[in-house]
Image (tube, helix red, strand yellow):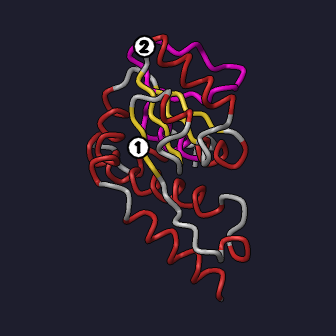
Amino acid sequence: METIDYLEDRIKRTLERIPAEDRDRLVDLILSSNRIFIFGAGRSGLVGQMFAVRLVQLGLQVYFVGDMTTPIIAKGDLAILISNTGKTMSVTKTARIARRIGSHVVCVTSNKKCDLAKASDTCIVIDPMEDGKSAEFAPLGTIFEDTVLMLFDCMVPILMKRKGTTEEDMRSRHAIWV
């Protein structure tokens, strides 16, 4: 199927352009932070929520910004903020607040010169390399969102190994106790 081939190729090529140092830095930050706060709006937020679930299953203390039970972020915490354009006002404002408080702010965006990147300590750039076919096969940021999801999913085994966590350990923290 043409769409599957297109998405697979674009996501793989986009992932390959992310420096290993950026992924390794994010792993180090996740493992060394007191608590982790994740936020994004729309589909970027959904990708962030999926990553948050995996981090909880790894035994980390994770919150999704905007949930009613999310505490205030503090010094020593990590904020992972996701926005394709880096212009989403709620995400950029969250970065400014978290950084002012003394948290480390990591943004994941396609635009290294955006407001969100300027408000962050660390910026991971996901450059989907527009090719003119996106509107046909992957409209409205699909390549960005799918690549971020794959980046996060590829980090889970690395985090598991570094923490000494098994799949059985993760299963014991699964929401429906399977």
Image side of residue 132 versus residue 129, left or right: right
Location of residue 111 in the rendering, given as x and y in whole percent from the top left corner:
52, 47
Q: Which residue appears at 62% of the width and 46% of the height?
A: 85
- Which residue is nearer to you in this view: 135 or 171? 135
Please give the residue where the numbered disc 2 appears in the rendered image.
Answer: 102
Report crowding for label 2: few under 14, some 14 to 19, many 20 or more residues within 10 A (C-alpha): some
The secondary structure type at the circle numbered 2 is loop
Q: Which residue appears at 42% of the width and 45% of the height?
A: 124
Location of residue 165 in the rendering, given as x and y in whole percent from the top left corner:
33, 44
Q: Which residue appears at 69% of the width and 76% of the height?
A: 137
Please give the residue where the numbered disc 1 appears in the rendered image.
Answer: 169
Q: Which residue appears at 59% of the width and 15% of the height?
A: 71
- Which residue is nearer to you in this view: 1 or 19? 19
Q: What's the magenta region?
A: 50-78
Q: Is residue 75 magenta?
A: yes
Whether 6 is drawn above or below 168: the answer is below
Say which mark, if any, is on residue 12: none
Location of residue 125 in the rendering, given as x and y in whole percent from the top left corner:
45, 49
